Image (spheres, grey):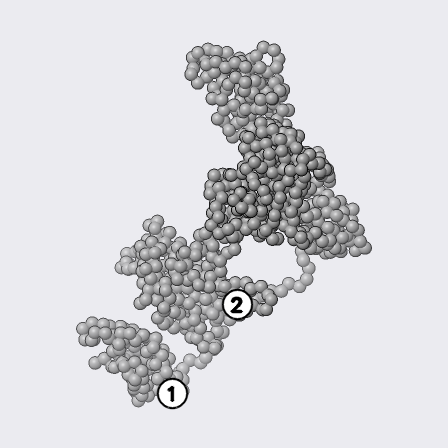
């Protein structure tokens, strides 16, 4: 919110200087981002009028001007501004004045004497425009000091508002906070209704239900279309960051900035009654004031007229922007003023969908006082009549019965204030602060009954009132006390592996931690085949961030692709974060809203490029599935987890180089942890990824489960090893063979190691040779050769029967 300091002071009287005012605004939560001083040091700068302008005899781009400043003989000024012309009123810095750090003295320019300087807005420090002289209104009084004529000195103050303070999107709303903080009062405002001079009205029908509960309009006829915007209004708009356009438009902007109520002015000669406020039709189009064509759907609201049938033609996008077809212009003499209350839920996100950001939409998204429309209409009417004349008709107001609830009283207890703040505020100060903020206060035995004004959407419970007291009374006046009571130290469970250990382990294995957006593009999920069960956002920041991520890998792979595209040959990234899925409809209780989306903590990693960093000791080779599998198994070893890998049917995984990961040592049976493997070549092509990328993604909670260590006696008897080599069909997985070996060998099998895999001469096509070592040991005795041979026999028989394996000859 940007506004003029002098404008604010016209609403609240205070002796605080500019620095103190800015400090107060920040202290009460209206953070001042920038203060731009305007018009300081303009002594000697007056309003001048060019009465003669001829070309300089020695320079084509210079003119020799005669400038009247009201003291008799015009001054001769040499000027190079392209807009210098006879009749123009512009600022003139007289001899002896100081402008922009430059002292003005008599001078000769190309042999012609000059006694002063005609100035641009930039030279005066009023604006960034240096394209020509600052053009003043034609009726500007010649010779008067410019500072007095423009209401200077002044300052443009910009504050940053939190979303809950929508009431401060107006100068008058800010004035209430300033008055409360500085012990002043807001100046009363003339809200007397302007009596109707004609019977002209426009019928209004509301067909959007509670989304538009109030719509107020008024016809004004006989407006002078040539009436200019007064200097005081144009300057206040300019210092608030709004460019003056024309009187009718400027009045609506002025009322919005002063009161906080967005308005719109329609050219009544281009509008056909009745006016209907309704939902837009699917595919309906409207050319906006800025020239763009908006394509709408049923989520938008429109103001429509009856050209072509009742409510047939949309003439404005509700709460956002008016249409080109009915805009006011230089010939407008009959105007229909509109001020409506659009509820935030009907406006939120609509501007972004159209690629717009408007002051009206910004205010309606955060909430506008529902009682303001009539006040704004009366105020705008008074301004137009005072400046451009005209004959107003009666105010037309359409409402939806029961849609607007009156603010309810809130009980505020003095004991609650002391308990929450840890400080006592005098009763008189409490009442002063609340009344200065525009609240109704009635004393009770325990405190007060307080009714907030309708503009304060953020005041709903007692704690909100306590917060207002703390904010205005001053946070620095509340004592800082340390909470008393016994401290509880929550020790982490030894049965859960800390996330920090997982992070440090992956960093030690040469991965870098990444933090990706929790929102992704729906099209990206479609490429991954993960679009089912996703949670879309009702109000996304952009189309690329419209869905909550169901997996970590799409974001990580996107980060990997960006790095790979920028010649980062070896990329290794990991992330710990949450993924989201829609709630199970079965969890919904009858009559209750749908439960919140399900959140799951996960860990994921991706890698591409060389397996190890470039060095002389090892031969360079690309990373492969087994490198990632080794990283994952070392990570699982931190929790003592035993993993099993089975072929995966994930649509984003390489059909022969991806697997689902299971944990087999948890109570209750094995648990699916996640996925590991190479990205499918088709997906890599869709993502424009030119390298082979590998990754894994696991649910974090079951991975973190860590069994407590238990001491066990070591066997005093030696182990026996038997090595076996089997020929088995290529499609038989090692995990299946290992399970059969463990079942057949029984309790004496201490370890099973696969130490060779061979395909080639001596092994028929379609088969492979697997060599394994069986480590056998008993805790009660030394195993004999007969014991070991019996185990081997059982293993050979089990592998032959279960998998068709045979001893390699």
Q: Residue furthest right?
A: 445
Q: Residue at x 74, y 55 (%)?
A: 411
Q: Secondary structure at mark 1?
A: loop
On the question of residue 7 being in view, the answer is no
Disc 2: CA contacts within 10 A as few (<14), some (14-19) or many (>=20)? few
Residue positioned most to the bottom: 786
Q: CA distance from mark 1 to mark 2?
A: 59 Å
The residue at the point 54 percent across, 26 percent down is 121
Instruction: Tell which circle, 1 or 2, labels the residue nearer the N-terminal end.
Output: 2
Give residue 660's position: percent from left, percent from top: 38, 69
Q: Nearer the viewer, residue 672 or 666?
A: 672
Look at discs 1 and 2 and give the one toward the viewer. Answer: 2
Read off the residue under disc 2. 585
Which quarter of the rendering shows the N terminus? top right
**Residue 622: % across, % down:** 29, 59
Residue under pointer 1: 781
Position above or below: 258 against 696:
above
Badge 2 marks a residue whose secondary structure is helix
Residue 588 visible in this rendered orientation of the protein:
yes
Name the one closer to the observer, 677 or 538.
538
Left or right, residue 800 beside residue 381: left
Q: In the rendered view of the protein, which quadrant contains the C terminus?
A: bottom left
Q: Residue at x 37, y 83 (%)?
A: 743
Tell me the number on the disc at residue 688.
none
Tell me the crowding category of disc 1: few under 14, some 14 to 19, or many 20 or more residues within 10 angstroms, Cα based: few
Quadrant of residue 31 within the rendered picture: top right
In this view, the residue in front, 682 or 421, is 682
Return the x and y of residue 374 as percentages of the image width and height: 67, 42
């Amino acid at each position: 919110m940007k506004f003029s300091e002098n404008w604010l002071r016209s609403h609240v009287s205070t002796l605080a200087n500019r620095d103190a005012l800015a400090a107060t605004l920040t202290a009460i939560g209206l953070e001042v981002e920038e203060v731009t001083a305007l018009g300081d040091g303009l002594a000697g700068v007056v309003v001048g009028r060019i009465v003669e302008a001829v070309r300089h005899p020695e320079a084509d781009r210079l003119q020799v001007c005669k400038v009247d400043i009201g003291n008799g003989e015009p001054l001769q000024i040499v000027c190079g501004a392209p807009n210098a012309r006879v009749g123009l009123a512009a600022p003139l810095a007289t001899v002896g004045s100081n402008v922009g750090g430059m002292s003005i003295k008599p001078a000769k320019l190309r042999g012609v004497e000059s006694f002063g300087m005609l100035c641009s807005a930039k030279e005066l420090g009023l604006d960034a425009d240096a394209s020509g002289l600052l053009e003043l209104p034609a009726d500007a009084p010649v010779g008067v000091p410019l500072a007095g004529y423009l209401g200077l000195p002044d300052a443009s103050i910009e504050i940053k508002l939190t979303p809950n303070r929508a009431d401060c999107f107006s100068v008058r709303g800010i004035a209430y906070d300033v008055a409360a903080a500085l012990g002043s009062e807001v100046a009363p405002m003339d809200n007397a209704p302007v009596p109707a001079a004609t019977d002209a009205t426009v019928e209004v029908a509301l067909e959007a239900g509670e989304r538009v509960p109030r719509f107020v309009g008024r016809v004004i006829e006989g407006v002078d279309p040539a009436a200019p915007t007064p200097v005081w209004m144009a300057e206040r708009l300019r210092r608030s960051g709004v460019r003056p356009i024309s009187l009718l438009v400027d009045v609506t902007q002025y009322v919005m900035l002063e009161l906080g109520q967005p308005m719109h002015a329609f050219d009544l000669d281009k509008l056909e009654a009745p006016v209907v406020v309704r939902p837009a039709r699917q595919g309906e189009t409207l050319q906006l004031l800025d020239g763009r064509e908006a394509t709408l759907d049923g989520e938008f609201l429109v103001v429509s007229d009856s050209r072509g049938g009742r409510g047939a033609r949309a003439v404005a996008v509700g709460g956002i922007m008016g249409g080109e077809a009915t805009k006011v212009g230089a010939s407008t003499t009959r105007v229909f003023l509109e001020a409506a209350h659009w509820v935030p839920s009907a406006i939120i996100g609509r501007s972004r969908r159209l690629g717009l950001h408007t002051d009206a939409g910004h205010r309606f998204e955060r909430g506008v006082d529902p009682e303001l429309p009539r006040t704004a209409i009366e105020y705008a009417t008074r301004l137009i009549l005072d400046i451009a004349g005209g004959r107003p008709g009666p105010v037309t107001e359409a409402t939806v019965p029961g849609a607007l609830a009156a603010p309810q009283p809130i009980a505020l207890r003095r004991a609650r204030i002391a308990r929450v703040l840890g400080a006592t505020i005098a009763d008189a100060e409490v009442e002063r602060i609340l009344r200065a903020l525009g609240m109704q206060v009635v004393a009770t035995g325990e405190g007060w009954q307080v009714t907030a004004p309708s503009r304060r959407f953020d005041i709903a419970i007692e704690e909100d009132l306590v917060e207002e007291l703390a904010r205005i009374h001053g946070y620095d006046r509340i004592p800082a006390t340390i909470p008393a009571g016994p401290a509880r130290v929550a020790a982490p469970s030894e049965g859960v592996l800390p996330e920090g250990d997982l992070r440090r382990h992956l960093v030690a294995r040469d991965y870098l931690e990444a933090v990706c957006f929790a929102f992704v593009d729906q099209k990206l999920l479609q490429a991954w085949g993960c679009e089912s069960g996703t949670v879309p956002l009702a109000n996304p920041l952009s189309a690329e961030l419209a869905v909550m991520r169901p997996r970590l890998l799409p974001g990580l792979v996107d980060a990997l692709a960006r790095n790979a595209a920028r010649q980062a040959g070896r990329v290794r990234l990991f992330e710990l974060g949450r993924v989201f899925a829609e709630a199970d409809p079965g969890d919904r209780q009858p009559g209750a809203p749908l439960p919140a989306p399900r959140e799951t903590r996960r860990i994921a990693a991706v890698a591409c490029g060389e397996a190890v960093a470039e060095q002389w000791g090892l031969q360079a080779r690309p990373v492969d599935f087994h490198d990632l599998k080794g990283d994952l198994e070392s990570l699982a070893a931190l929790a003592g987890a035993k993993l099993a890998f089975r072929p995966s049917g994930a649509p984003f995984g390489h059909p022969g180089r991806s697997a689902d990961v299971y944990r087999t040592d948890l109570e209750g049976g094995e648990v699916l942890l996640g996925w590991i493997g190479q990205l499918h070549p088709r997906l890599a092509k869709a993502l424009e990824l030119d390298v082979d990328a590998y990754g894994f993604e696991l649910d974090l909670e079951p991975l973190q489960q860590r069994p407590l260590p238990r001491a066990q006696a070591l066997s005093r008897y030696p182990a026996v090893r038997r090595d076996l080599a089997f020929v088995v069909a290529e499609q038989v997985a090692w995990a299946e063979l290992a399970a059969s070996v463990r079942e057949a060998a029984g309790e004496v099998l201490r370890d099973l190691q696969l130490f060779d895999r061979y395909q080639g001469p001596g092994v028929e096509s379609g088969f492979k040779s697997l060599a394994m070592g069986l480590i056998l040991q008993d805790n009660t005795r030394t195993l004999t050769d007969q014991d070991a041979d019996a185990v081997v026999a059982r293993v050979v028989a089990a592998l032959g029967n279960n998998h068709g394996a045979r001893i390699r000859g």
